Every structure is written in structure tokens, then in C-alpha cells.
Amino acid sequence: MSQPPSPPPAHAFAHIVDDDEAIRDALGWLFRTRNVASKAWPSAEEFLAAWKPDWRGCIVLDIRMREMSGLECFDALLERGNILPIIFLTGHGDVPMAVGALKKGAFDFLEKPFDDNALVDVVIRALESDARHQASKETQATVAALLTQLTPREHEVMQLVLAGKFNKVIADELNISMRTVEVHRSRVFEKMGVRSAVELAQLLAPGRDTARD
Amino acid sequence: MSQPPSPPPAHAFAHIVDDDEAIRDALGWLFRTRNVASKAWPSAEEFLAAWKPDWRGCIVLDIRMREMSGLECFDALLERGNILPIIFLTGHGDVPMAVGALKKGAFDFLEKPFDDNALVDVVIRALESDARHQASKETQATVAALLTQLTPREHEVMQLVLAGKFNKVIADELNISMRTVEVHRSRVFEKMGVRSAVELAQLLAPGRDTARD
DNA sequence: CCGTCGATTGTGGCTATCCGCAGTGTGGAA
DNA sequence: TTCCACACTGCGGATAGCCACAATCGACGG
């Protein structure tokens, strides 16, 4: 039961967060004409209140807003584990601000006035980037879910199996019989949905994303 | 013989590239007092001419220079496969320039006048970053070297072993006897310096760095 | 022509893995 | 108390992997 069938697909939106209605409308129109699904939010607070970790897409965030600024909103999102690419818009940005934002993981940082085409391009790349990240995140979550199904002892045995040790050695180290190790090992394979130690190792050593932007 | 004992350690330097002698001297003095080894270059051209792919450390690069600019130098280095972290210095930077540089992989982008401590901190982090990258790059290179020692057939067998297949199945797919597969498999382990398929899988599925910057 | 190397195969024996069957003990939930 | 998940164990057989010994064959270079 630790695997809900499949979380509601959560359609991917370009979330526009700007307290200037004119901008929201303009961006909304721009995205509509380019077939990019978007949703507008009149303030960082409202966006944050609605935000869910499983949202897909990207965020187009104005820096200067009444109340909470875009940068503060960014920090809040980071703390909450947001992984959506964030594109900053600003009319009054300076270099340190841009550098800081990008180094903290922002996807891009555009100055107003910006070129419509440039913005749409960036947004599309951001959406693609998020989509790519999705695949790996999902399998990662699946693997994590499978791991929680293991009993402590099974987990322990798995570690030693992954260390390339013989059942015999594992039995020795845990002071149990070989047969018991075999049973645990077998259950581990079964629960993790693999059929050999090699597959297990590959499942747990995914790495190699290399997706940079 | 495909593994030269160990390439000359190539001491790590903070390479200062600036056509302003006063800046070079100031930075050189700053780094000396903070125990950071540095080397100064009076122009991008001279630096590029001397640059070798195996250099370690980091690069502190002025944007505005006579002849070749820092950004042009950056591009040239990228093309040549540079992996050293690059820190840009500029007195006349604008946001798009900074954003562009960072998105292309620059380590940081500082505006003059900069704080001495801030610069040293950044340089030290850059040097650490490079040092970290070193470890993985080296083992990666070692693994690649070991892989070249494999005969085509061995490589082929290895792939199937990594797919978690039984020797029997491998023998079938390659239309050879099980015994032959065993021999190849054994040689693969020997040449790759591992003692089990699990170790092999882990060796070739590195990943899990999680080091962000 | 000879030597080396890679690929190939066989025999035989030992070890390790995989599994079904059967059973014990413990602690927590119903 | 009863039921159940978890950890544990032994036996025995089928299967797979590991390895030394022994050999054949073609390609390539000297």
C-alpha cells in the first residue's frame, strides 16, 4: 500500500507571479498564443499558499512586488523543497542580485523590458527541463518507496550484498546462518523487483543525470 | 601500459588574467597573504597560449581587456574543454552579461569594486570545487583506461553481464559456449580489478555525488 | 616460419546460489 | 489468547559460477 496508484498528473503550468495585473494579462496572452499553459497569481503570498510540492511546470516570478518580493518567495520555495525551474523578471535588477539568484538555482534572470520571443523560449526550456527532471524524480521516489518495504534486517543484508560479499561472509558478519541470509536476500530481490544483485546495484546507483539546464 | 604512473601533479593555482598590472599586483598580493597560490597573466591571449587541459585550480578573469575580452576567453576555454571554475571580475558588467556567463558555467561573477574577503572566499570555494571534481574525474579516467584494455569480445560479454544475464543466456546470445563466456567474464573482472559483477556494476554506475557547488 | 594474442572449447571438481519444505521463537495487534 | 509479521534455522537438491588443466584456430608482425 505504500504506492498510491499514481498521483493525479498535475498538469504542467507556467506559473506567473506578479502583482501588476497588466503584466499578468500580457504574459497570459503571450503564453496562450504560443500554446503554453499558464496560470497567474496576483501575489507571492497567494502563490505560496496554493503551492504544492508535486506541481509541475515552471515559475515566472517578478522580483519587485508589494509585500513579499520575488526573492523572498524564492527562498520560501527553496525551503519547502521546490524543484520547479524559476525564471525571474525584473525592471530594477543589479548584477549581484542576478548572480545570487542564479547561484541559488534560479533557471534564468531576465530584465524588463524583455523580448517576448526570448521569454517564451526560456519558459519552454524551463518546462522541458522540469519534464526531464520528472522522470528521474519519479523512479527515485519509486525506489525509495520500495526500500521502505524492506524490514531492517533485509536492509542490512542488502547493504552487504551490495558490498559484493558472499552469503557466507554476510552470515558470518551478522552471526546468522547462511540459510537466513539467503532468505533475506531473496526477499530483498523480490521486494525490490529485481532478479540479481547486479540489477539491484544498478537500481540503487542511478546517478549520471548530467542534465545541466 | 595504458596507465602512466601518475601525471605530474600540476599544482593548483588561482590564475589571474587581467591586463591591468595594478590589479594583477593587488590580487597577487591579496592571495599571497591568504596563502592562496596564484599566477598572473597579462592577457587572455598569453593565458590561452599557455593553458593546458590538465591545469588545476581556478581562473580569475577580467571581463574588460584590450584585445581579447574575458568573455571571449571564456568561450575559447569552453571549446577547449576547460573544467576549471572561472570567476569573472568586471567594473562595467550588466545583468544579461552576468546571467549569460553563469548560465554557460561560470563559477561566479563579481563587480568591482569587490570586497577582498568576498573574493578570497569565492576563490577558495572555487579551488575546493575543482579539487572535488578532480577525484571523480580521475577515477573516471582510470575506469575508462581499464575499459580500453578489454578486447571487443570481453567488452561485449561485460555488457551482457551488466544486464544481469546468466552465463548460459550470454552464451546463447553470442552463439558461443558457456565456457568461453566464463573465460571472458573472468578476464573482464581481472582487468577491471573487481571480484564480482556487483562491484563491476558499481564501478561503472558511479553517480551519487550530490556535491552541488 | 615462428611467436603472440584473441577467441574458442572441453573436462572435472569445488563453491556458491537459489528454493521448496518444514519448523522455532518473539513481540505486537486484534 | 490468537493471529501475524519478522527473524531465524536445517536439509537437500537443482542450478550457476569459478577455475586449473589442456587445446585448437586464425590473424598479425617479425
Image (cartoon, coloured by chain):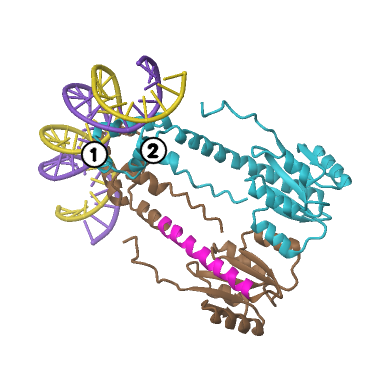
Chain colours: A cyan, B brown, C yellow, D purple
Query: What kind of residue is marked 2?
Result: His
Q: Residue at x 70, y 63 (%)?
A: B98
* Chain for disc number 1: A
Depth check, front residue: A6 or B91: A6
In x, y percent, where is residue B41? 59, 79
Depth check, front residue: A55 or A212: A55
The residue that label 2 is drawn on is: A155
Predominant SS along the magenta part = helix
Secondary structure under the numbered disc 2 in the rendered image: helix
Q: Residue at x 69, y 33 (%)?
A: A11
Q: Residue furthest right?
A: A22
Instruction: Please indicate, yes or no, whether residue B112 appears anywhere in the rendered image.
Output: yes
Query: What kind of residue is marked 1?
Result: Lys
Label disc, if present, on residue A168 of the rendered structure? 1
Secondary structure under the numbered disc 1 in the rendered image: helix
In x, y percent, where is residue B85? 57, 65
In x, y percent, where is residue A36? 76, 38
Label disc, if present, on residue B139 of the rendered structure? none
- Near mark 2 (Cα within 10 A), the count class, few <14, some 14-19 or many ≥20, is some
Depth check, front residue: A158 or B144: A158
Q: Which residues are magenta?
A: B117-140
The answer to whether residue A31 is left or right of residue B42 is right
- Near mark 1 (Cα within 10 A), the count class, few <14, some 14-19 or many ≥20, is some
Magenta stretch encompasses residue B119: yes
In the rendered image, which quarter is residue B174 located in? top left
Quadrant containing the C terminus of chain B in the rendered view? bottom right
